[in-house]
Structure formats: structure tokens, C-alpha cells
Amino acid sequence: MLRKKNRLMRAGQTEKASALALRIGKDIVNRNQTRLSRINSKTSTKDLWAAVRQFTGRPQSTGLVDNVSADSPNQHYASISSDSDYQPPQRKHTAPMERLHQQFASEWQVFSLLDKLSATATGLYQLPAWFLRTGAPAFYKPITRLFNVSIESSIIPHQWKHAVICPVPKIASPHEESHYRLISITPVLSRQTP
């Protein structure tokens, strides 16, 4: 159709070429709408953005940069965010003694929380939100117990504190450590509050 439109333009038949250009534009819009309508933006944001990049012609950045290694952003941010006068705060009990052995989160609250989990990054242990959502009827009791013991003892499970650090470029062409924003991706359960 584009070749035909170009031939019409060269032949001086601008009205026919304009009509064909409108038809081409409508076909492109219809095809893009069809492609985007097949993508569920809530569960497949990666596919959605891949389609948008394809339509706009903007390539995805590869993240490979000269002079920046995997450890250099860590060293950079450690060097600018250290405090020589830092002293850890005193440990204190956050749960009042009279509320010990009380249920802080109900099983229904935890079930509802698991049942409504949205698609999100999985974190270090690769336990996806869809798995927790699907298995909510089996998982809600032990997870409720885990939440309540954690609150009662004022201790967060060590595994919930581990994170994957993902460097996200702040600018289009990063070439040094300060051009990255470091995002911590913790496990899905550590980001939930009953």
C-alpha cells in the first residue's frame, strides 16, 4: 500500500494518494490496538512495554556500560553514604508485654492479603506473587503464624531482609556509577503488611 501511495504521488494523483494514506494510518492503528488488546497490562507489563518500544521505535537499553562493573555502583554509594559518627540505636521492645501471645494478624486478613497479591518482582528467592495467590488456601495459616511470631518477638526473619539490588539508569546513556538508581527487590512476603 505504501508503494502504491508513492506511485500515486509521483504520478500527481494526490487525492488518491491522500485517501490511501488515511487507509494506511487506520490499518496501522487497528493493528496496534489489536496487538495491545492481547496484552494484559496487569500481569504482563514486560510484554506491554516491549510492544510500546516496538511502536515508538525506541530500543531497550542493554545496561552494558564501559568503565562500570557489577560492583562499582555498590562501592560508589558506600563511599558517599558512610557516616563516621553513626552509632546503632539501642534495642527496645516494640510489642508491649501485656499483648504477648495475642494474635496481631488474623488468618482472614492474611488470606485476603495473599488472595489479592498483584504481579510484582519476585526478589532473591524467586517466589512469585502468582504462586502465593494461587496457593493462598494452603499457605495462609503458616504465614499468619509467621507474621504473628515475627511481631510478637520483634524479629523479622533473616531471609526477608535479603534483597536483589537492581541498578536502574537515571539517564538515557549512563557512563558512571552516579547515573544509576539502585532498587532493592525484597521477597514478596516481606513487602506485605497484614
Image (cartoon, helix red, strand yellow):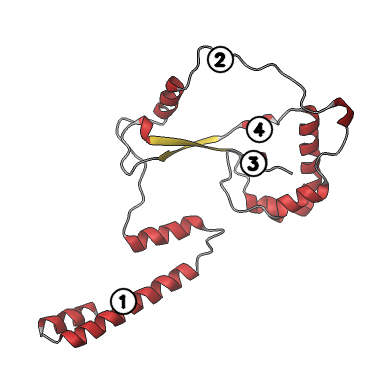
Q: Please report whichever mark, 1 or 4, sits nearer to the chain's N-terminal start.
A: 1
In percent of width and height, residue 100 lies at 87, 30
**Numbered disc in front, either 3 or 4:** 3
Q: Please report whichever mark, 1 or 3, sits nearer to the chain's N-terminal start.
A: 1
In percent of width and height, residue 23 lies at 30, 82
In the shown orientation, is residue 12 left or right of residue 167?
A: left
In percent of width and height, residue 158 lies at 67, 29
Circles 1, 2 touching at the beta carbon (< 8 Å): no
Identify the residue shown where x is 89% and y is 28%: 98
The three-letter code of the residue at mark 2 reads Tyr
Element at badge 4?
helix
**Quadrant including the C terminus:** top right
Element at badge 1?
helix
Q: CA distance from mark 1 to mark 3?
A: 45 Å
Circles 2, 3 touching at the beta carbon (< 8 Å): no
Residue farthest to the top, as pictured: 85
Q: CA distance from mark 2 to mark 3?
A: 27 Å
Element at badge 2?
loop
- In the image, residue 120 sits, relative to residue 44, either above or below, namely above
Q: Which residue is mark 2?
A: 86
Identify the residue shown where x is 40% and y is 76%: 30
Q: Which residue is mark 4?
A: 159
In the shown orientation, is residue 12 left or right of residue 169?
A: left
Q: Can you tell which quarter of the image residue 73 is in?
A: top left
Q: Which residue is mark 3?
A: 191
In the shown orientation, is residue 187 left or right of residue 29?
A: right
Which dot marks residue 25?
1
The three-letter code of the residue at mark 3 reads Arg
Q: Nearer the viewer, residue 95 or 146?
A: 95
Identify the residue shown where x is 63% and y is 31%: 161
Mark 1 is surrounded, within 10 Å at the Cα level, by few (under 14), some (14 to 19) or many (20 or more) other residues, namely: few
